[in-house]
Image: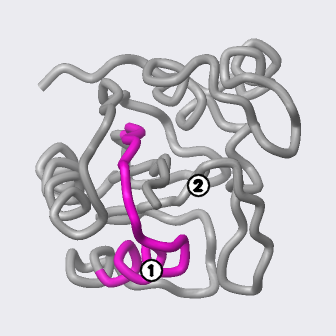
Amino acid sequence: MMNRVFLGLGSDLGDREANIKYAVKSLEEQVGKIAAVSPVYETEPVGFTGSGDFLNMVISVETILSPSDILRIALALESEMGRTRGKTRNISRIIDIDILLYSNEMINSGALTIPHPRMHERKFVLVPLNDISPGLVHPILGKTVKELLSECKDKSRIRQFTS
């Protein structure tokens, strides 16, 4: 059965634009057909002071893979691209791939939480997600992405990126 997964991508180290493009291409090759791609946004780090601004975007992918398979692929891709994971959550990174939503599923295991537990608090997720799916309903909060964005208290700077 085909499912739609929404993935958030971010990079603030190295050639940020090339990192994002490589990740999108690799995800299409390994996860499934990309159904929608948001514009890329330049955003300030949230929750820490990083080495510079992030590039962020959201894609939706049609897939037959399970959420755990997608997580495995995303973590392997992050590692392949040079990301090292430690105990610190908010740090600079070459690439970050988050599973935001997977169909209408709700998962809360030790390794994976879907919907992403902080997505509704972050403009760098909500703005690009709103670009590609404003009417998408959050399965726990019962609000559309457009509603979540209008209620979001995140005041961080975000602007569309042009290369």
Q: Is residue 53 visible?
A: no
Residue 159 lies, in percent from the top left, at 41, 18
Count of labels in the image: 2
Q: Is residue 55 left or right of residue 141?
A: left
In the rendered image, the residue lying farthest to the front is 1
CB under 8 Å between discs 1 and 2? no
What residue range appears in magenta? Answer: 56-76
**Residue in view at x 35 percent, y 78 percent:** 73
Mark toward the start of the polypeptide (1 vs 2): 1
Residue 152: give its label: none
Work out whether 152 lies above or below 20.
above
The residue drawn where x is 53% and y is 80% is 68
Q: List x then y, in percent, for residue 17.
A: 17, 43
Residue 88 in the image: state x and y as whole percent. Answer: 62, 77
Residue 62 visible, this orientation: yes
Tag 2: amino acid: Tyr
**Towards the viewer: 115 or 93:** 115
Q: Is residue 69 magenta?
A: yes
User: Which residue, given by chain and number where applicable, does mark 1 sit on?
Assistant: 69
Q: Residue at x 24, y 79 (%)?
A: 82
Residue to which mark 2 is pinned: 102
State which quadrant residue 25 falls in: bottom left
Q: Which element is circle 2 on?
A: strand
Q: Give the answer, above or below, for where 49 lies relative to 57.
A: below
Q: CA distance from mark 1 to mark 2?
A: 12 Å
At x 76% / y 16%, what residue is drawn?
147
Dot 2 surroundings within 10 Å: few (below 14), some, or many (20 or more)? many
Q: Nearer the viewer, residue 105 or 15?
A: 105
